[in-house]
Image: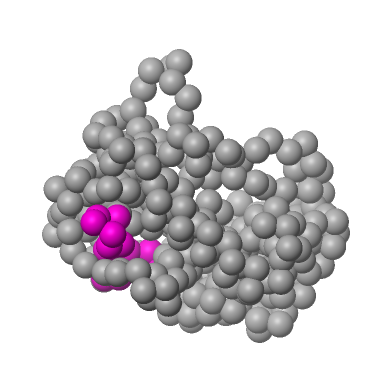
Amino acid sequence: MNSKTQSHSTHDASEDERNRDIKIYVNGDIVHRDEAKVSVYDSGFMLGDGMWEGMRLYDGQWAFFDEHMDRFFNSCKAVSLDVGMDKAGILDALTRTAAANDMSNDVHCRLMLTRGIKDKPFQHPKLSRSGPTLVIIMEHSKPAGSLQSSGITLATVPQVRGLPMSQDAKFNSHSKLNCVIACLQAEQAGADEGLMLDPHGFVNTTNACNFFIVRRGEVWTSTPDYCMNGVTRQKVIDLCRANTIPVFEKNYSLYEAYGADEAFLTGTFGAQTPVASIDGKTIGTGERPMTARLQALYKDLIRQNTGSRSL
C-alpha cells in the first residue's frame, strides 16, 4: 500500500480523549484501564478460548440487547462455556460499567468471556478450574465521517470462510486468526478490508462485517451457511421484507458483485457502511439510494428499540 494513502476500516472512530481514562469491568471490579489486568494463564489469552459481543448504547439503552444476548448465550452453550450469570446479571454489569464511566450515548461495548485461568499452560478445557473471566470494555466511540463519504475499499483475499465443522463463523469467538489473516491479505493488496469467499467460491463476508450488494433494485447477501451470524445483517433483511424491498439470501459470485449498483457492509459499530470499490473496480456510479434508504430505516428501528432521540 502507498504510505501516502489513508486507509480505512469499518471500525474507524473519531478520536475521543475521554477514552484515555475509561474504567473497565473485570470479574466484578471496575478499574481504570491502566489497572485492568488478565492473567497470562487465562484461556482467552493462551488459546483464544472465549466468546464476545459488540453492542452500542443509545441514550442509556443497549440496541437489540435481547438479540445480542441470545447469540452470546447460544455460543457459550455450544462450547460448554458457563457464563456464570443470566442475562439480567450481564445487564447489571453493563449498567454498572456505563455508570462508572458516565456514559449514555455514542458508546461501543465489547463484552468478553473466556473459560478463565488455567492451572497449566495446556489446551484441555478442564484445566480451567477457577471459573470464567468476564471483561467489559466501553469506549466513547462514533464512526468516522469518512466512512460514509468515501466508502470502504475491498480486495478479494485467498483466506475463506470455512466449513461449520472446522470453525463455525456463527461463533463470535476470541479465535479470530482466520479473519486477521484475511485483513492482512487485504492490507497488503492495498485495500481497507478483505472480501472473503465461502468454500465453494461464492461471495460471503469481509474479514470484519457482513456484505450486501444491490442489483436492479434488489438487495442480495450470502446464504447463512458460512457467514457470521450478524445481528445487524438480520435487521437489514427484516427491514427489507417489512418495506417491500426485494431481498435474497443466495449464492452469487464476484461477477455479480463487480457489476452491482451499490454494495455495503453491516455491523454493530458502523451500521451500514458503503463500499467504494472491489479489487480496484468502482461499484456503481457513486450514487447509493438503496443504502441511504436502509440507513434511514435502520435509524428509525434503533429509535423504536431504544427510545433514542439523539439519532
Q: Residue at x 69, y 62 (%)?
A: 57
Residue 215 in percent (x, y) is at 24, 55
Q: Is residue 111 visible?
A: yes
Residue 265 in percent (x, y) is at 41, 52
Q: Residue at x 14, y 48 (%)?
A: 255
Locate residue 53 relative to residue 96 in the image: left or right.
Answer: left
Q: Please tell me which residue lies in front, 161 or 214.
A: 214
Q: Residue at x 58, y 62 (%)?
A: 299
What range of the chain is rendered magenta?
214-230
Q: Please tell me which residue lies in front, 276 or 296.
A: 296
- The rendered magenta stretch, by its main secondary structure, is classed as loop
Q: Please tell me which residue lies in front, 294 or 18.
A: 294
The number of numbered badges drawn on the structure is: 0
Q: Residue at x 36, y 38 (%)?
A: 286
Locate residue 14 relative to residue 18 in the image: left or right.
Answer: left
In which quadrant of the rendered view does residue 249 lie?
bottom left
Residue 209 in percent (x, y) is at 41, 54
Determine whether 44 is above or below 3 in the image.
Answer: below
